[in-house]
Image: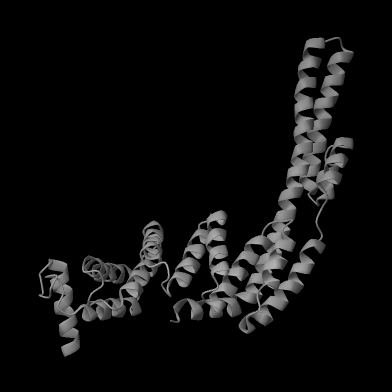
Amino acid sequence: MKTRLRLFVVMLACWLGWPMGGEGGYLNAPEEVFSFALDLEKQNDHKRAATEFGRYVSAGRRDAGNGFPKLEEAMFRKAVNLAQSNETDAALRAFSELGEAYPKSPFISMALLRMGLIYERAGVREEAERRYKRLAEMGMDTELSALSRLRLAWLAMGKPGEEEVARGHLLAMDHPRFMEPVHELLRELDQLPKLPYKDPWISGLLTAAVPGAGHLYLDRAEDAGVALLSNGLLLAGTIQAFSKGISGLGAALGVVELGWYSGTIFSAVSLTHKQNQRLREDQLNHIWQLQQPKIETIGLEMEWHY
């Protein structure tokens, strides 16, 4: 009860901006503010936790860290809680501030991993790769470095033609905790090029020969029927117009048919690429469902263990 009352007083004082003594005239017991912020974090009240960690950080940086032994950790936790509150831009800025202020902090590795995950989930692959590569090259934490290579491998697996890049990242992982998922991912990686992909050239050439044939090659019978019927009607109308001496109509229908015919070929080729990509993504989702429990458990343990 006394602890709760003390934390409540500290929170109220911080909120109202009351001075509480000390050389900086701000905090009398910064460890209580840190402890209170930590309690909020454990209760998943991330927004308030970020605010309280921020108060600790502001006072600590103003006093050059004197009396604030957990300043680096507070900066890291502030950023993490901002990310957990979906304030990703603010979280990225907070992680960057930690790196600028304490480039050799033991929290830098975890900050880089977190930043990479934020960018990855936002679909900003290049920025995610930059953080993962920096973490892998730093070698400050072997487990986190290995996890960063795993994320790099996963990103490469998502792009056709980068299988060898993914393989290189996986083979560079030599941490014992990752051996089982790495071996399984290498086996799955070997299977990705062997999926029953369709050839865009074949679908395009078949469509050029007989409109709809390329769609039929893709097992899209309905699309094949529409393509054959629409092109057939336009071609028949063009021929009939010219045969009856209506050159203007025949020319107009011919132009329409040429565009429609070209569009049919483009459609077949485009659908082939999309179908292949979807096939690959389905396989990757299957792989991820098998690997996620192992990888996520490892990742969460390493991200939060310090």
Q: Position of residue 203 (x, y in %)?
A: 83, 45
Q: Position of residue 119 (x, y in %)?
A: 50, 59
* Scheme by which the image is coloured: one colour
Q: Residue furthest bottom?
A: 1
Height in image: 52 above or below 276? below
Q: Nearer the viewer, residue 67 or 173?
A: 67
Q: Quadrant of residue 73?
A: bottom left
Q: Nearer the viewer, residue 27 or 8?
A: 27
* Quadrant in the picture for the C terminus: bottom left
Q: Nearer the viewer, residue 88 or 173?
A: 173
Residue at image point 80% right, 56% down:
197
Asked if residue 250 shows in the view, the reply is yes
Q: Quadrant of residue 209?
A: top right
* Quadrant in the picture for the N terminus: bottom left
Height in image: 220 above or below 300? above
Residue at image point 74% right, 62% down:
164
Residue at image point 51% right, 65% down:
117
Q: Nearer the viewer, residue 284 or 136?
A: 136
Q: Position of residue 156 (x, y in %)?
A: 66, 61
Q: Quadrant of residue 298?
A: bottom right
Residue at image point 71% right, 55% down:
277
Asked whether, in this view, residue 166 is left or right of residue 51, the answer is right
Asked if residue 45 shows in the view, the reply is no
Q: How many marks?
A: 0
